[in-house]
Image (cartoon, rainbow, N blue to C red):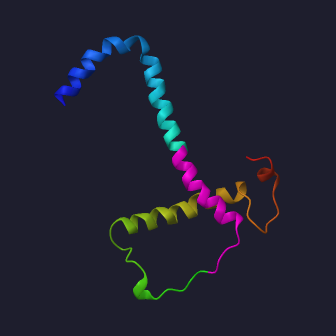
């Protein structure tokens, strides 16, 4: 950590005239990364809405993963929250196969 402080103290006088550009680049880089992450998630949502739904496969109780502990339960909780809170909002904005398109979906809101 001390070495990073030395490097920052050395480079700060040279960076000071370009501080706005530096901070703007970092902020825009974060926004770019977040938009790429959202794109990955949204592709699955759009494909699931625009393709024919498959009937759910039946699985035995022994083959289902235990989602009561750890990361699986957190994922299940977040997924349930997402479906209940954001799902209805997405239904008004995103088209679904077999349903007529609304004016809001048509203008690309």
Residue in the picture at 47% in, 61% down: 78
* Relative depth, front residue between 75 and 44: 44
**Residue in the picture at 43% in, 14% down:** 18
Estimate the x, y position of residue 39 in percent, counting from the top left.
Answer: 58, 49
Residue at position x 69%, y 60% in the image: 91
Residue drawn at the location 47% of the way across and 27% of the way down: 25
Q: Residue furthest left?
A: 2
Q: Is residue 44 left or right of residue 6?
A: right
Question: How far across and down, in percent of the image, does residue 15 sit?
Answer: 37, 15
Q: Quadrant of residue 55?
A: bottom right
With respect to residue 93, does 61 lie above or below?
below
Which of the pair 38/67 is nearer the observer? Answer: 38
**Which residue range is magenta in the image?**
36-55
Along the horizontal axis of the image, is 69 left or right of 96? Answer: left
Q: Is residue 101 above or below residue 4?
A: below
Rendering quarter of residue 11: top left
Q: Position of residue 83 (x, y in %)?
A: 57, 64
Q: Position of residue 20 (x, y in %)?
A: 46, 18
103 part of magenta stretch: no
**For the N terminus, which image quadrant?**
top left
52 inside magenta stretch: yes
On screen, 3 above or below 39? above
Type of secondary structure dominating the magenta stretch: helix
The one of 85 and 71 positioned closer to us in this rendering:
71
Count of all numbered marks drawn on residues in the image: 0
Q: Is residue 62 left or right of residue 7?
A: right
């Amino acid at each position: 950590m001390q070495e990073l402080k030395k490097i920052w103290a050395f480079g700060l006088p040279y960076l000071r005239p370009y501080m706005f550009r530096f901070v703007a680049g970092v902020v825009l880089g974060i926004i770019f990364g977040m938009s790429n992450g959202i794109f990955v998630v949204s592709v699955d949502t759009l494909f699931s809405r625009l393709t024919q739904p498959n009937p759910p496969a039946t699985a035995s109780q022994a083959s289902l993963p235990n989602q009561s502990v750890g990361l699986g339960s957190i994922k299940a909780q977040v997924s349930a929250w997402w479906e209940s809170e954001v799902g209805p909002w997405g239904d008004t904005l995103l088209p679904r196969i077999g349903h007529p398109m609304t004016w809001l979906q048509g203008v690309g809101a």
